[in-house]
Image (spheres, rainbow, N blue to C red):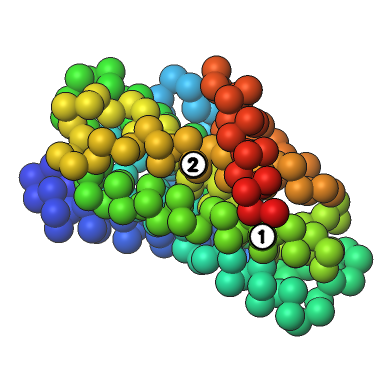
Amino acid sequence: ERMALEHQGEGMEVVLRLTRATLALLQDEVREPRTQATQFAALLPRIASTVQYPDIHTTAALRVLLAYLVDRFWWSPSLWKYFLHTLYPDDPVSTISQHACTGSTHLFEQEEVNVFAEGLTLAGLIKNSFRDLVNKQCAEKKTPVCNNNYLMAAIEEAREKLPLLVLTVEKGRHEGLLGVTGYSKPLSVLYSFLLYVDCLIYQLQNLHHSHLPAGNTMVDEKIEDIKCSLLQVQKVPALHPILQSVLNPTCLYSQQQDLHVAANKSIQQRE
């Protein structure tokens, strides 16, 4: 922590490397590394909202570690970007298409056999931590640490990718990849990507207009397009409940009725 404060660039890189290593060890199949990583996380200072027990399990250790990062390093652009990169490591469109081509859709088949690799749990915790980081910046009334150019490029990419993702998900459901039983890799990647989009929108909506880069007057229109695409994903029949759970709070805004109209209009135009 002292190194990160004194040498913000190099110091934060050390912090993030240690974070990646700890997260990997917390999800290791071998018990001993997992236990040692949990003991390490248990030594970190804790904020009031995290568990206070001296002995904690791996999921609690994940919560303690992420809460510590937000509490101590909320000012770091590197941490802001790290959270987003963690949620979007793979392209959901290519991942779903790839697994549809393999034909590996047997009931209860799981690609990830390591029960400690909690992809969905970690993605949910990362999303919550990202929101806590944004809220912390707002509470401190500091200039946002987000990279505006990166943020706007990410918003535009999500806007372009989501219509293709809608078509891929609609096709993938016929392959049994995203149904009630679910298939681990496509489900995890799609879930993480939806949380990634949620984080982008949350950050953008918490930016004052004075902090937006010049020439981005169409920001609201881009967000509306994204929400319309999310509503179309939500309407896909037999969509896995875990995906429905993340789509509901993402789409439930005061403009929901207008979004439904816009989404239906978009579908009619496509047909």
Gap in angstroms between the C-alphas marked 2 and 1: 15 Å
Asked whether, in this view, residue 220 is left or right of residue 244, the answer is left
* Residue 12, percent from left and from top: 22, 52
Instruction: Kindly identify the residue that appears in the image at 52 percent across and 66 percent down.
Output: 91
In this orientation, which residue lies closer to the viewer: 169 or 102? 169
Callout 2 amino acid: Asp
Task: Check disc 1: other Cα within 10 Å, few if <14, some if 14-19, many if 20+.
Answer: some
Q: How many marks?
A: 2
Is label 1 in a helix, a strand or a loop? helix
Given the current orientation, which residue lies at the most extreme bottom position?
Answer: 102
* Residue 33, percent from left and from top: 54, 63
* Residue 145, percent from left and from top: 21, 38
| Mark linked to residue 167 | 1
Callout 1 amino acid: Leu
Instruction: Kindly identify the residue that appears in the image at 28 percent across and 18 percent down.
Output: 139
Reading the image, the residue beneath label 2 is 225
Asked whether, in this view, residue 236 is left or right of residue 154, the answer is right
Quadrant of the frame with the N terminus: top left
Asked whether, in this view, residue 46 is left or right of residue 36, the answer is left
| Mark linked to residue 112 | none
* Residue 192, percent from left and from top: 56, 51
